[in-house]
Amino acid sequence: MSTYVIAGAGQIGSHLAERLAGGGHEVTVVTRSGSGPKAPGIRRVAADVADAERLAELTKGADALFNCVNPRYWRWQTDWPPMAASMLSAAETSGAVLVILGNLYGYGPHDGPLTEDLPLAATGVKGRVRARMWADALAAHEAGRVRVVEVRGSDYYGPGCLDQSHLGERFIPRLLAGRPALFVGDPDQPHSWTYAPDVARALEIAAVDERAWGRPWHIPTAPAVTARAVAERVSELTGAPAPRIQVLPEWLRRTAGLVSPMMRELGETRYQFDRPYLLDSSAFQATFGMTPTPLDEGLTETIAWWRARETAAA
């Protein structure tokens, strides 16, 4: 049995906590409000992740500390630096492996599949923030102060993925109800979609296998498909009406961004949805023997989750 600390209880942190606790491990979930999944083996603690002293106290004796925090898009510049520094300090003090849940923003726009050896050349604010976080963590690792690893996925879908997912509440449940899905970007561009439970699997592997430490890895992700193809599979798997997709025009997104911080921030990552956006996860798959969940299987589980949620709400 191992002891783990998870900072964050969002769409990935909750999956990870339940997975680790289900495996018989002791799990502490740290959030500002004390939220998180309720299950045997999971302790929920209300604390500020940016409080380095408190986080170090909570991480004492832990085998790994997982960074699964996800601040609001428009607060990355202010919220991420102190939290990242606190987690790095807590891992160094406790000796825990620091496992960072990253993303692909740091690469910036790129033609062709994204691989881990690409430079972090982002020019956008959020991409630069993520690139700096990894640079600081890697420098500490190379200095022998801490063991770190970062796993990066593309846009998430799956059970628990709500408003922050392009295939979340604006997409799949609307299709199930016979309504048009809402999509920001070109629904006919191939795009890599990473299944949320696969993210949790990859995080656990990265924490316990020392071959993972000291570099970034891409989370096993099924072959890219268009958003329209996803909508068609949802319809075929459920017998829902032929799918319709309502695309948010760029001019309307810009207008909405005048009052919506979230819509305003989506402009920085627009490039991910107006051209093929392809994630190459072959390195992780070959090294650790993990294969991604096939799209149909992931969609079937996701559809079942949405239906159960709707039934509970009714």
Image: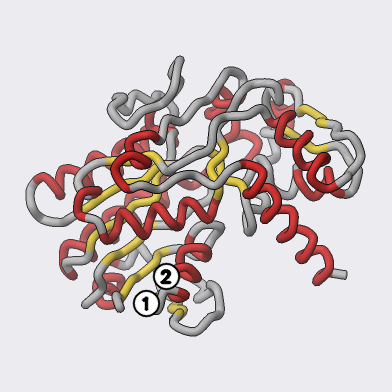
Q: Earlier in the sequence, mark 1 or mark 2?
A: 2
Residue positioned 71% across, 25% down in the render: 187
Q: Which residue is mark 1?
A: 25
Q: Position of residue 205 (x, y in %)?
A: 33, 56
Q: Quadrant of the C terminus?
A: bottom right
Q: Secondary structure at mark 2?
A: helix
Q: Which residue is mark 2?
A: 20
Query: What amino acid is found at the position of numbered circle 1 in the picture?
Result: His
Q: Position of residue 85 (x, y in %)?
A: 27, 55
For label 1, the crowd category at 10 Å Cα-Cα, with few meaning under 14, some 14 to 19 and many 20 or more, is some
Query: Disc number at residue 111?
Result: none
* Quarter location, residue 282: top left
Q: Is residue 268 above or below residue 78?
A: above
Residue positioned 42% across, 43% down in the render: 219
Q: Among all residues in the image, which is located at the extreme bottom?
A: 40
Q: Secondary structure at mark 1?
A: loop
Disc 1, disc 2: CB below 8 Å?
yes
Residue positioned 49% across, 44% down in the render: 292
Q: Quadrant of the N terminus?
A: bottom left
Residue positioned 15% across, 49% down in the render: 141
* Quarter location, residue 183: top right
Query: What amino acid is found at the position of numbered circle 2 in the picture?
Result: Leu
Q: Position of residue 76 (x, y in %)?
A: 45, 45
Separation of marks 1 and 2 at Cα, in angstroms: 6 Å
Q: Nearer the viewer, residue 276 or 280?
A: 280
